[in-house]
Amino acid sequence: MIAPLQPGSDDPRLILREEELDGGLELILLAEASLWAAVDAVLETEALGLGRSHWRAAFLLRRRPGIGVQDLSKLTSLSKQAASRTLADLEKAGLVERVSGDLDGRRRPAALTAEGVAFEQRTAERLRALLARAYRTGGLDGVAGTRRILAALAGSRQGVGPGRRMPT
């Protein structure tokens, strides 16, 4: 009898062919396109002139309050200049507040305003509905497996931000 794997451990028996890996990549790209289409639909109704990077920053600020330009850049793979511009746009729209850091005046942690939280939530609601429907299709084992796979793909980005550590 083969001993069951511990959650989070690698399965040395798992050997995937190039075609299977390419199929997985294709599904990830198609799922991403579906999620971004939902984001775009909500952003269109907002009429704030904001794009995907703005919503993504707002979502990450809700999940990781106090991140600044450097952390946002690490989390999203945006250049520091693009991350700075994104936060400035959100601040100008009244969705984000930034204050000078305690030790370094150049660091300006950001937080969502009440309007920013509402903006982020309107879009996230749509995405949560899509994700919940997909999770129900996969069942409990599928949800757990998907989360492990996505966490492995996210890698060290999971530990970015104030008070964040890599999951054990």
Image (tube, rainbow, N blue to C red):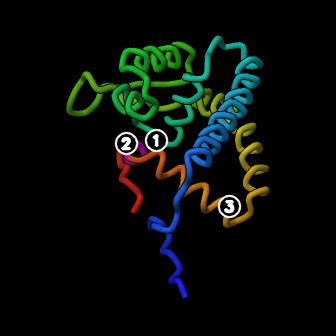
Who's the residue at 25% across and 22% down the image? 106
Q: Residue furthest bottom?
A: 1
Report the Cα–Cα distance between label 1 and label 2.
9 Å
Image quarter of residue 25 = top right
Provide residue 76's location: percent of width, then percent of height: 46, 30
Who's the residue at 34% across and 28% down the image? 70
Q: Of tags 3 and 2, which is closer to the observer?
A: 3
Disc 3 marks which amino acid? Gly
Who's the residue at 45% across and 65% down the image? 10
Provide residue 26's location: percent of width, then percent of height: 64, 37
Q: Earlier in the sequence, mark 1 or mark 2?
A: 1
Can residue 3 be seen here? yes
Left or right: 15 with respect to 134? left
Q: Earlier in the sequence, mark 1 or mark 3?
A: 1
Q: Earlier in the sequence, mark 3 or mark 2?
A: 3
Secondary structure, magenta segment, majority class: helix
Question: For the residue labelled by badge 1, is the local secondary structure a helix, a strand or a loop?
Answer: loop
Q: Quadrant of the C terminus?
A: bottom left
Q: Are marks 1 and 2 in contact (CB under 8 Å)?
A: yes
Can residue 122 be seen here? no
Disc 1 marks which amino acid? Arg
Image quarter of residue 24 = top right
**Residue picked out by circle 1:** 64
**Residue picked out by circle 2:** 160
Question: For the residue labelled by badge 2, is the local secondary structure a helix, a strand or a loop?
Answer: loop
Disc 2 marks which amino acid? Val
**Residue picked out by circle 3:** 142
Question: For the residue labelled by badge 3, is the local secondary structure a helix, a strand or a loop?
Answer: helix
Residue interval drawn in magenta? 156-161
Q: Of tags 1 and 3, which is closer to the observer?
A: 3
Q: Image height check: is 91 above or below 6? A: above
- Crowding near pointer 3: few (<14 within 10 Å), some, many (20+)? some
